[in-house]
Image (cartoon, helix red, strand yellow):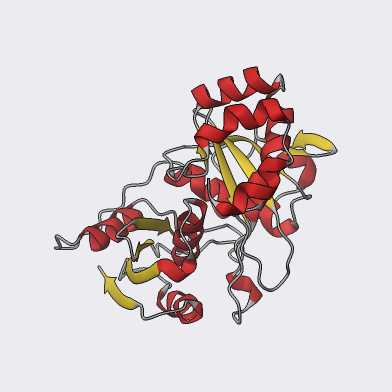
Amino acid sequence: MHPRFAKPFADLPASLQDALAPLLDQDFNARFTPAQIVELKRASQLDDRALRLALLPLAAACSVAPISRFYVGAIASGLSGAWYLGANMEFAGQGLFHSIHAEQSAISNAWLGGETGISEITVNYTPCGHCRQFMNELSTAKSMAVTLPDDHSPLHAFLPHSFGPGDLQISDALMSPQAHPLHLESRDPLELAALAAARSSYAPYSQGYAGVAVECENGQIYEGRYAENAAFNPSLPPMQMACTHAVLAGASLADIRRVVLVEHRAGLISQLDGTLSVIKTLPGEIAFQHYAV
């Protein structure tokens, strides 16, 4: 079990601990399969929502918050029935706009896990306006629910009179399948991972399709896809998504040794400066490659 889970795990009921302990091994990737959820519900005698609320402290334990010291956890319920943990992440010394919110983290975890929509998101604090707008871009925004410790309501109850893709004549949505025809001649696994992320990214407003892949010192690779938003500012850059993906899987930002950014050369924007800004906050020597394709 990762040390970050020790305290919240100790506070769980014994019956839930017994069922959960084998799942929180070194290969835990901050996701629970439908079969694992069934077993956790059986052992704890909790229903879906009560179990997610009980597991939220485990998600919050993944938080990296050197600026705010405010630890937020979220669990996204994918359409497949799987659950995906997420937590907020901040980058010391960098502008707050580089931060990743817990809801964005959990949704990214689900998207990278192959989900095409979210049915419900559970959070330990009320979603801020930034996150409500980010969730409004989702393929399932009209039907998804938000669960808090003291509330359970549809997303539209948190965001009345919303502004979304349809207001900009965009029929696509975040988490819907994407397959952009980007090409890069390479046999490097990290470069190919970044290319695959760029091909799967979502950027209907700028066509700035982009993906980042980071490699840790143990050779493990994590990717991030650009996730654009109709309101622009809640857009999630690929470098931040790759970082939160790595941390949720048990790595540390200090483990990152190499970064590759692949982006569409004909896009209206570039992720280059933002990616380099985040890299500056990471310790150690980091090799960086950038491809505009």
As drawn, 114 above or below 89: above
The residue that appears at 61% across and 82% down in the rendered structure is 93
Q: Is residue 21 above or below residue 58?
A: above
Query: Up-down: is 242 above or below 274?
Result: above
Residue at x 41% of width, y 67% of height: 255
Please state, as top left, top right, bottom left or bottom right, where the C terminus lies in the image: bottom left
Regarding residue 152, the answer to whether it shows in the image is yes
Q: Is residue 229 left or right of residue 158?
A: left
The answer to which quarter of the image holds residue 150 is top right
Q: Which residue occupies 57% across, 53% down? A: 3
- Residue 137, percent from left and from top: 58, 48
User: Considering depth in this image, is 33 or 118 the residue closer to the camera?
Assistant: 33
Tally the numbered discs. Answer: 0
94 or 66, nearer to the observer: 66
For image coordinates 29% across by 53% down, the residue present is 196
Give the percent coordinates (x, y) of residue 257: 35, 71
Q: Quadrant of residue 156?
A: top right
Q: Where in the figure is residue 29, as x and y percent of width and height? A: 47, 44
Q: Relative to the observer, which residue lies in front, 178 or 125?
A: 125
Q: Quadrant of residue 143?
A: top right
Position of residue 155 relative to residue 68, above or below, is above
